[in-house]
Image: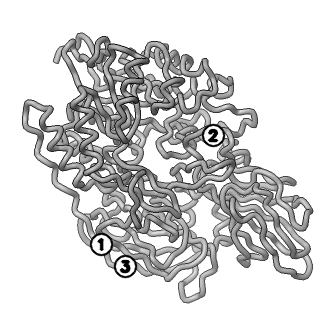
């Protein structure tokens, strides 16, 4: 089509090339879906009758260290945009810098927190300088993909749900200018829930609304703010996220369909958040703030009870929505793409183990410090601090007694005396009795960053590890040796090729790493790992971090994408904190635990 005029919001409905246009959108995040499956998921979105794909951009993955950028492989945003264009899908880009997304720190890089005065999502110079440097890299990549340049991007979102944060009146103007000054020319949008609409807008950007249950008063409110403008639900929540120790949220098709039907009858545009959730691979899950500083981490699966499941399956919701959206097309919808086959592989027995203590030679050199140092301020990763994973703090003690964390542990610590496990400290348990013993002994705290809060007012307080003093019998502990265990691919590869592994005939000690081979004799298929006899830890397959598992549920399986396996032997390494039955099972369908309806 000839490109004269892109998406406009000058009357009560959108126009594209000056003709009425309705956005039928769905969110799929490229960073939550194996790259080999991007096309499959997009084709399924298109076959459902949607015309637009929306995605966030996770700053923390694209700039893992200040000034070091990564737009390759799984993070090749340009390839994702090219693919959308090839499949005739429009794109709404949501570049942040903050994205929420149930993602660690809402997508902001943790190295920002090295600055003790940091004020995230404000015009504090330490923040704006970092945003400007990132946008210098990001925006030049997306500018050529705009509609006016012949590309698929028809709109760009300014930040994300700022009305729920709103700590700085100048901030949204700063972000808008950061986009415009770098060549963004398409329609600008903002997105907020009803409460956030009061404070989240910025002049020159169309306001859109986020919700799950339709209330006509919300729409009246949106109309009052911007009369005679198109109405759009930027996030129509198709499901909800899950927390460790909770239940699996479902939002039934029977509840959802009438709302979507009504939105369409009201001539509104819609974006399903999520259309396909995918997975919080690695340590990237966010957390829900439940008071200060306590938080509850989110699970690894981001299935979200979306129309397309975590592994790309059609659901009841999908079929009903497809039928509904088909009425808004003059041509028949494309055929449904075939489903990926899945396989429950034979159980795998662990062959070797390596204790946490023996794995320390493969980590970076430890750091000595009189005082405890939080994860982000450790002198590692070219002085960008440690972002994710575990940190081991060790110090000498001369007696038993009461260890008091003074609530300075973020988020959870396994406590050892001379490598013997004593107990767990977290937000709930802040005191622990240490056994008596003779002479000098080593106290070790293995502290896990379980995921930083991604939404709410406490973003500036998301430093992890030991964030302050701990006491033994009222005395402040001093002189720590600190090991950074971020379990990045380099570490996992060094571990794998080390000659230090012990046979399973020797009783394993915990925490520890366990190693096995998964043999795949034909073309690799998707599968799910089930760790029924294990308690809590992380699984790596061929060096890729599949995410955390935890027996408290609700999630009981981890998604393993077929493209991450290969024919022949596949390396499986499990880091387990406390117990194992020594085998891994596989299933052909997921188990997300007991369900509860979204309230």
Q: Are marks 2 and 1 in contact (CB under 8 Å)?
A: no
Toward the viewer: 408 or 141? 408
Residue 574 or 253: which is nearer the viewer?
A: 253
Residue 314 shows in the view: no
Element type at marker 1? loop
Task: Tell me what residue is drawn at x 54 percent, y 21 percent.
Answer: 172
**Of discs 2 and 3, which sits in the foreground?**
2
In the depicted view, which residue is nearer to us: 103 or 341? 103
Q: Which residue is mark 3?
A: 347
The residue carrying mark 2 is 459
Q: Is residue 387 above or below residue 228?
A: below
Q: Quadrant of residue 207?
A: top left
Query: Quick check: 268 above or below 425?
Result: above
Distance CA(mark 2)–CA(mark 1): 40 Å
Distance from the alpha carbon under mark 2 to that under mark 3: 42 Å
> Would you call the spot at circle 1 few (<14 residues within 10 Å), some (14-19), or many (20 or more)?
some
Q: CA distance from mark 1 to mark 3?
A: 9 Å
Circle 2 SS class: helix
| Mark closer to the chain start, 2 or 3 | 3
Residue matched to label 1: 344
Name the residue at 73% across, 48% down: 378
**Label 3: which secondary element:** loop
| Quarter that holds the N terminus | top left
Q: Using the rendered image of the protein, determine whether residue 597 is visible from the camera's viewpoint.
A: yes
Q: Return the disc, 2 or 1, that comes first in the chain's sequence.
A: 1
Q: Nearer the viewer, mark 2 or mark 1?
A: 2
Residue 182: where, in percent of width, then height? 47, 17
């Amino acid at each position: 089509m000839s490109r004269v005029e892109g998406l406009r919001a000058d009357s009560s409905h959108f126009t594209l090339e000056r003709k009425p246009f309705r956005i039928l959108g769905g969110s799929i995040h490229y960073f939550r879906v194996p790259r080999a499956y991007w096309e499959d998921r997009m084709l399924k979105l298109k076959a459902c009758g949607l015309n637009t794909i929306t995605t966030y951009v996770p700053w923390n993955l694209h700039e893992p260290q200040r000034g070091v950028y990564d737009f390759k492989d799984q993070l090749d945003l340009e390839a994702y945009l090219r693919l959308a264009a090839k499949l005739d899908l429009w794109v709404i880009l949501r570049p942040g810098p903050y994205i929420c997304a149930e993602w660690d720190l809402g997508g902001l890089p943790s190295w920002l927190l090295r600055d003790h005065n940091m004020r995230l999502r404000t015009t504090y110079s330490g923040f704006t300088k970092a945003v400007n440097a990132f946008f210098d890299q990001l925006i030049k990549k997306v500018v050529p993909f705009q509609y006016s340049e012949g590309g698929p991007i028809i709109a760009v979102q300014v930040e994300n749900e700022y009305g729920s944060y709103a700590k700085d009146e100048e901030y949204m103007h700063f972000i808008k200018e950061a986009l415009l000054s770098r060549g963004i020319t398409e329609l600008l949008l903002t997105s907020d829930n009803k409460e956030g609409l009061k404070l989240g807008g910025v002049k020159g950007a169309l306001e859109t609304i986020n919700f799950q249950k339709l209330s006509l008063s919300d729409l009246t409110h949106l109309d009052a703010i911007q009369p005679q403008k198109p109405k759009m639900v930027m996030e129509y929540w198709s499901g909800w996220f899950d927390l460790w120790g909770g239940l699996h949220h479902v939002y039934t098709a029977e509840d959802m369909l009438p709302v979507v039907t009504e939105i369409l009858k009201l001539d509104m545009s819609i974006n399903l958040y999520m259309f396909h959730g995918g997975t919080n691979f690695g340590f990237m899950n966010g957390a829900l703030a439940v008071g200060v500083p306590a938080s509850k981490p989110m699970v690894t699966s981001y299935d979200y009870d979306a129309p397309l499941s975590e592994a790309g399956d059609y659901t009841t919701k999908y079929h009903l929505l497809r039928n509904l959206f088909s009425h808004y097309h003059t041509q028949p919808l494309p055929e449904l793409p075939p489903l990926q086959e899945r396989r429950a592989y034979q159980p795998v027995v662990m062959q070797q183990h390596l204790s946490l203590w023996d794995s320390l030679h493969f980590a970076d050199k430890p750091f000595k410090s009189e005082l405890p140092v939080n994860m982000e301020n450790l002198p590692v990763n070219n002085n960008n601090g440690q972002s994710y994973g575990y940190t081991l703090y060790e110090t000498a003690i001369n007696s038993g007694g009461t260890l008091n964390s003074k609530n300075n542990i973020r988020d959870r610590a396994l406590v050892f005396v001379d490598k013997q496990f004593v107990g767990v400290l977290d937000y709930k348990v802040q005191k622990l009795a240490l056994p008596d013993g003779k002479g000098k002994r080593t106290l070790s705290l293995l502290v896990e960053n379980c995921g930083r809060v991604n939404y709410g007012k406490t973003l500036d307080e998301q430093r992890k590890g030991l964030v302050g003093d701990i006491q033994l019998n009222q005395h402040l502990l001093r002189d720590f040796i600190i090991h950074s265990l971020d379990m990045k691919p380099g570490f996992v590869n060094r571990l794998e090729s080390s000659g230090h592994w012990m046979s399973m005939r020797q009783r394993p000690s915990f925490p520890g790493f366990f190693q096995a081979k998964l043999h795949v004799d034909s073309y690799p298929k998707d599968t799910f790992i089930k760790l029924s006899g294990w308690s809590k830890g992380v699984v790596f397959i061929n060096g890729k971090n599949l995410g955390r598992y935890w027996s408290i549920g609700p999630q009981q399986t981890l998604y393993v994408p077929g493209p991450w396996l290969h024919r022949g032997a596949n390396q499986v390494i499990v880091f387990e904190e406390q117990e194992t039955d020594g085998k891994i099972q596989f299933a052909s369908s997921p188990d997300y635990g007991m369900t509860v309806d979204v309230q």
